[in-house]
Image: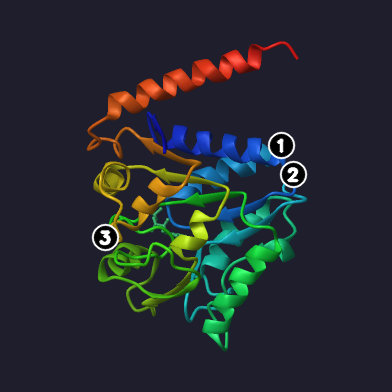
Amino acid sequence: MQVVILKDALEVANYGAKLFCQQLQIKPNSVLGLATGSTPVALYKEITSLYKQQKISFAQASSFNLDEYLGLSGDHPQSYRYFMNEQLFDHIDINKSHTHVPNGNAINPIAACQDYELAIRQAGGIDLQLLGIGRNGHIGFNEPSSSLSSRTRIKTLTQATIDDNARFFADDEYQPELSITMGIGTILESRKVMLLATGAAKAEAIKNMIEGPLSASCPASALQLHNDAVIVIDEQAATLLEHQQFYKQIEAQNQKLQQKLADLPR
Ligand code: F6R
């Protein structure tokens, strides 16, 4: 795991946006894995700004979102499809028919999960998967005890996740307790993953993910198995890490190496 510790949420968003730029420069028709929630909002703002400055284009790209609430259609304001349109897709040049979010309103949701896996495979697999992390260590909606080799499926949300996400729903509004989510096995097949986390509330999950044992109790710890996972966090989310200084040292060395490679005669 590459652990990048930055000053604050803004630096985390900018770092993430830069990585998206690099990905699309190397491969304009990249298949991007996207996430919802509070964490990526600043990243999507920065990406939108880079697009407006013509520094990034999604014209050839396609995308697959991690998850969706079961029972909400894409035009429901709390659905993740709606969120993605509002926060990103409506502001960039991506072809909307190339953006995929699990269908929370499918007549046969089990078949919809299988279709989603197939669509990812047919697109050639995900090149760069963006992730957030729940306070309980979930990635996507893979809650603690999820199989580390799980595929896209229906998943029951824990009370902790329901409570965490209640802030998005009005008091008298229906809040789903089930979701469709990519599995951990699905996520691990992405060629590169980038997990963003900010704020003290995520510090324990971050510690468990990076320094805890590989365990279904912390689904994000499965990223220890990925050979190209970058964890981008702010100082507050890093506070419980035992080896913080070591990660910073590695990052400084990485940057020196990158500079040396960039300076090589072509
Ligand atoms: C969202 C998702 C979730 C969130 C996680 C953190 O698509 O898959 O795993 O990334 O719940 O959410 P925030 O960023 O709101 O703290």
In this figure, which residue is indicated by the disc labeled 1?
A: 25
Q: How many marks?
A: 3
Relative to 197, is 117 on the left or the right?
Answer: right
Q: Is residue 175 visible?
A: no
Residue 258 placement (x, y as % from top left): 56, 20
x 58%, y 37%: residue: 19
Q: Residues within 10 Å of mark 1 (few under 14, many from 20)?
A: some
Q: Which mark is residue 152?
A: none
Q: Which residue is mark 3?
A: 217
- Dividing the picture into quarters, in which one does residue 249 lie? top left
Disc 3 to disc 2, C-alpha distance = 37 Å
Quadrant position of residue 27: top right
Relative to residue 266, is residue 170 depicted above or below? below
94 sits left or right of 70 in the view: right
Earlier residue among tags 3 and 2: 2
Q: Residues within 10 Å of mark 3 (few under 14, many from 20)?
A: some
User: Picture coordinates of residue 61 (x, y %)?
Assistant: 72, 52
Q: How far apart are labels 1 and 3 at the CA level?
A: 37 Å
Q: Is residue 138 left or right of residue 192?
A: left
SS label for mark 1: helix
Task: Identify the amino acid type marked 2.
Answer: Pro
Q: Is mark 2 within 8 Å of ligand 1?
A: no
Does 244 sit left or right of 194 as displayed? left
Q: Mark 2 = which residue? A: 28
Give the number of the mark in front: 1 or 3: 3
- Tell me, yes or no, if residue 192 can be seen here: yes
Closest to the observer, 261 or 128: 261
1 or 3: tag closer to the N-terminus: 1
Instruction: Find the residue positioned furthest to the bottom.
Output: 107
63 above or below 146? Answer: above
How far is the residue under mark 2 from the one under mark 1?
6 Å
